[in-house]
Image: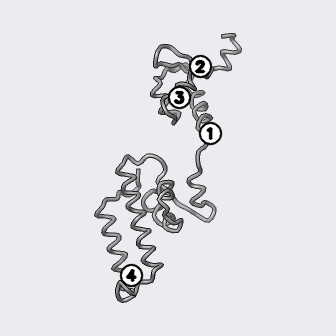
């Protein structure tokens, strides 16, 4: 979710304010340099992308969403701290903020989570949500993994595979 809410009227008011400032500085809208008008356009587009992202449940990383729409990095570094609560410094670039999570990393995180829930029972849906993979992918993994034991259809128990091996189970 966004740190600061965005509505269509907010996007419109920011756009109008930026143009009013540019016109006041350069005399009229036809005298505004192309770079300034492009910056206003990109800023407005970034706000609109965040508005739509938030309206549609705001899943994933908002900075990644901005990058996917081709918003320039200079605009992302202006918008993200204000609306997303993400700050950038000289050491943290936009690219580092949106590191792509690899499949293996997601499975490792899921297994690490499972070590904290030994002998607890979960439905396949709960485990699919926790893993971050689709229902079918998670189900196939559960069926092949020694970490999970099927209790009944749709219900799984997290096992301690190492302790089971030592006990001969």
Alpha-carbon distance for marks 4 and 3? 53 Å
The residue carrying pointer 2 sits among few (fewer than 14), some (14 to 19) or many (20 or more) residues within 10 Å by Cα, namely: many
Height in image: 123 above or below 54? above
Between marks 4 and 3 in the image, the one whose residue lies nearer the viewer: 3
Q: Residues within 10 Å of mark 1 (few under 14, many from 20)?
A: few
Pinpoint residue 116: horizontal percent, then vertical percent: 57, 28
Q: Calculate the distance from the C-alpha at mark 1 to the C-alpha at mark 3.
A: 15 Å
Residue drawn at the location 45% of the way across and 73% of the way down: 39
- Asked which secondary structure carries label 3, the reply is helix
Q: CA distance from mark 3 to mark 2?
A: 16 Å
Find disc 3 in the rendering and name its residue: 138
The numbered mark, 2 or 4, whose residue comes first in the sequence reads 4
Per the image, the residue denoted by label 1 is 105
* Nearer mark to the viewer, of 1 and 3: 3
Residue 106: % across, % down = 58, 38
Image quadrant containing the C terminus: top right
Q: As displayed, is residue 156 above or below residue 12?
A: above
Closest to the camera, between mark 3 and mark 2, is 3
Q: Nearer the viewer, residue 120 or 130?
A: 130
Residue under pointer 2: 159
């Amino acid at each position: 979710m966004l740190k600061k809410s965005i509505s269509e009227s907010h996007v419109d008011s920011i756009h109008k304010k930026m143009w009013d400032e540019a016109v006041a500085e350069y005399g009229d809208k036809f005298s505004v340099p192309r770079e300034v008008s492009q910056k206003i356009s990109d800023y407005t587009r970034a706000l609109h992308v965040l508005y739509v992202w938030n309206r549609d449940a705001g899943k994933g990383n908002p900075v990644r969403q901005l990058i996917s729409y081709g918003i320039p990095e200079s605009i992302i570094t202006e918008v993200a701290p204000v609306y997303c609560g993400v700050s950038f410094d000289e050491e943290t670039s936009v690219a580092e903020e949106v590191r792509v999570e690899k499949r293996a990393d997601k499975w490792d995180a899921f297994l690490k989570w499972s070590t904290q829930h030994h002998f607890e029972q979960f439905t396949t849906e709960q485990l699919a949500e926790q893993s971050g993979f689709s229902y079918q992918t998670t189900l196939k993994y559960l069926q092949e993994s020694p970490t999970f034991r099927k209790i009944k259809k749709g219900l799984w128990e997290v096992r301690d595979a190492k302790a089971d091996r030592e006990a001969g189970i």
